[in-house]
Amino acid sequence: MSKGTSTKPPSGMRDFLAPDVVQRRHVLGVVQRVYESFGFVPLETPTIENLGTLLGKYGPEGDQLLYRLLHRRDKLKRAIAGGADQPGGLTEQDLAAEGLRYDLTVPLARVVANYKDLPAFYKRYQIQPVWRADRPARGRFREFYQCDVDVTGTASLVADAEVCCAVATVLRELGFADFKILTNHRELLRALVADAGIPAEQESLALIALDKLDKLGGDGVKDELGEKGIAAERADALLSKLEQMRAPGALERLAEGDGPGARGAAELLELFGYAAHGQAAEHATFDPTLARGLSYYTGPIFEIQVDGLAGSLGGGGRYDNLIGMFQKQQVPAVGFSLGLERVLLVMEERQMFPELGIGPQVLLCRMGDVPASAAISVASALRAAGARVEVYADAAPMKKQLSYANSLEVAFAAILGPQEVADGTVSLKDLRTGQQESCMISEAARKVQD
RNA sequence: GUGGCUAUAGCUCAGUUGGUUAGAGCACCAGAUUGUGGUUCUGGAAGUCGCCGGUUCGAGUCCGGUUAGCCACCCCA
């Protein structure tokens, strides 16, 4: 059995056999069709990006999770040799200049900065795998597909509403009804944190703790804030401000004022106003505790929540400063990303997949004195008539051929004996009923496809 | 990164206070009169008990380490 090498794929990565692939294609087909219906155009970018492109965009956590690629050949040898003499030893920069992409948003930002003749409002979708050096868990992989939609070049919240609407449409078409698009605003969060007297350098720590409010509860978050060195009275202040935000009309009152959070609140109200007229209408929900870890978000932020899944089905937000990290001029942008594997996980658990046709519709079997060439020629005719046909390659007893047909779960076996060859027919056996009849090839092709 | 659980045949799992050749079901292979599957019956093949070390007369079983997987956190899609 074993020859010492594991035959499993690396942890957090998977092989996809036919049933998996068919399910994935089903979901991807819906995603692609819906995204295109919104006018998004496709983009594909390389698996590998320069580390300079990737580093410093996601925050310290993200940088840690980047896969680095070792230099190749002589460059690696020279780096190692050179490092031996250096006082500090080898550094990461000595060994690697490239890495695997961590998401699709940063590559998009690079593309927008690189191709100046893109449409003023560049609406692109991108469905490709990304890699994170994370510890795998349920619904979390080291290699996974993201299905991104983004709009660059406009600060209008119409774009934010459109990306929400696009992912909501996808989920609804796949059969989801109960998901929420949790929505918050980075500026609002910053204002609340500052208002509670928490210094700017502790802002991101505070936000991460806040994000756990629904899991840990108020006391839990207070403890966590305390551990991060935030005074109890400030934590209390922050929590009570958040509690106030949950009250009906809180967002409206904040928006009408001229405080630091006013603009964020007003933007959220505008966004909800637009969203109400699309597929996201019943799903978009204000959640003042939603924070999100990625550091590039500047405005509205989103996360898709569904019962029975600890993580999210997808997430996104506005990142008006990211493209400007690749060129002089800032370009506003907003996007949303669906996690294919997460969607599939929940669909699998809830048995949301329709019947998905797969594999041959008929196995062509032949008796021992029929030459293989005759079988190939019949198979060819059946295929020309639209059927999916597998030819049993070996010369084997009929029992074995039919037994194999059974294991394939193919609905029909077409049997070719000397008589059938002479008549230009096949004996078509329905393996579900056991009924067998002699048919012309065109007739067999038709029956098999019913 | 933290905590817990698990590791025995291709798969799902038994395996007694440590005691002879480690079992079952499913799957696989071969038969049950002549080249027709599924059900049934008979037989067969298949395991270095994750890996390394320790305790012991003796280890699948106990102990330590290690690796991998699962679950819950953390974080995220």
Image (cartoon, coloured by chain):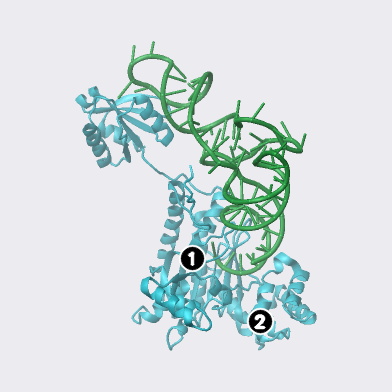
On screen, B32 above or below A327?
Answer: above
Q: Residues within 10 Å of mark 2 (few under 14, many from 20)?
A: some
Visible in this render: residue A333?
no
* Residue closest to the eye, A9 or A304: A9
* Residue closest to the eye, A65 or A58: A65
Visible in this render: residue A75?
yes
Q: Colour of chain B?
A: green
Q: Which residue is mark 2?
A: A203
- The answer to whether residue A277 is left or right of residue A225 is left
What type is the residue that disc 2 sits on?
Glu
Q: CA distance from mark 2 to mark 1?
A: 28 Å
- The answer to whether residue A259 is left or right of residue A166 is right
On screen, A37 above or below A344?
Answer: below
The chain identifier of the residue carrying mark 2 reads A
Q: Which residue is mark 1?
A: A131
On screen, A359 above or below A329?
Answer: above
Residue B10 coordinates in the image, percent (x, y): 51, 41
**Mark nearer the viewer, 2 or 1:** 1
Residue at 61 percent across and 59 percent down: it is A306
Element under label 2?
helix
Quadrant into which the C terminus of chain A falls: top left
Residue at 47 percent across and 51 percent down: it is A5
Q: Which mark is residue A448?
A: none
The chain letter of the cyan chain reads A
The residue at the far left in this view is: A422
Badges 2 and 1: C-beta atoms under 8 Å apart?
A: no
* Residue closest to the eye, A277 or A340: A340
The chain identifier of the residue carrying mark 1 reads A
- The answer to whether residue A449 is left or right of residue A309 is left
Dot 2 or dot 1, earlier in sequence: 1
What type is the residue that disc 1 sits on?
Trp
